[in-house]
Image (spheres, grey):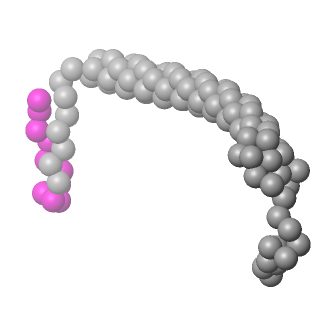
Amino acid sequence: MAKAINKNRDRILWTEENSRSGPKRIKLNLLILFSLLTLFFIGGCLFYVWSRIQVIQLGYEISNALKEERALTEANKKLRLEIATLKSYARIEKVAVEELSMSKPKPDQVIVIR
């Protein structure tokens, strides 16, 4: 490397003896830039595909949750119907008379609670 001093002595300029390294450096910089852009593009594509897969997977989970909700709603309706059937006065009276050998009370034995 040769050292060149300008007339004002306020700057020192460095020059390289081999002037052919300039185009090689530009090619290397372009190769690095192209490689980085390619990596970012591939990374972006992979992120896009991953996000689409996540959306599809969440769609399946939502679908399964909705099926489970429908099944639980149907089971709830059946249980409410069974409770209503078991609470019916006709059934209770039938069980009391037939299985427990109870008799109907006389009118003076009935106390109405409000």
Q: Position of residue 26 (x, y in %)?
A: 38, 24
Of residues 30 and 106, the one drawn nearer to the viewer in this rendering = 106
How many numbered discs, if any?
0
Of residues 108 and 62, the one drawn nearer to the viewer in this rendering = 108
What residue is drawn where x is 73% and y is 41%? Answer: 99
Q: Position of residue 16 (x, y in %)?
A: 19, 28
Q: Position of residue 40 (x, y in %)?
A: 48, 28
Query: What secondary structure characterizes most of the magenta part?
Result: loop
Of residues 107 and 69, the one drawn nearer to the viewer in this rendering = 107
Report whether 52 appears left or right of 114. left
Residue 62: tell me if it is visible. no
What residue is drawn where x is 82% and y is 64%? Answer: 105
Whether 7 is among the magenta residues is yes
Q: Position of residue 45 (x, y in %)?
A: 57, 24
Report whether 17 appears left or right of 30. left
Report whether 40 appears left or right of 100. left
Rendering quarter of residue 49: top right
What residue is drawn where x is 71% and y is 46%? Answer: 100
Whether 49 is among the magenta residues is no
Q: Is 10 situated above or below 32?
A: below
Of residues 58 and 90, the one drawn nearer to the viewer in this rendering = 90
The quadrant of the picture occupied by the C terminus is bottom right
The segment highlighted magenta reads 1-10
The quadrant of the picture occupied by the N terminus is top left
What residue is drawn where x is 83% and y is 46%? Answer: 94
Rendering quarter of residue 59: top right
Q: Is 37 situated above or below 83?
A: above
Residue 65: tell me if it is visible. yes
Rendering quarter of residue 68: top right
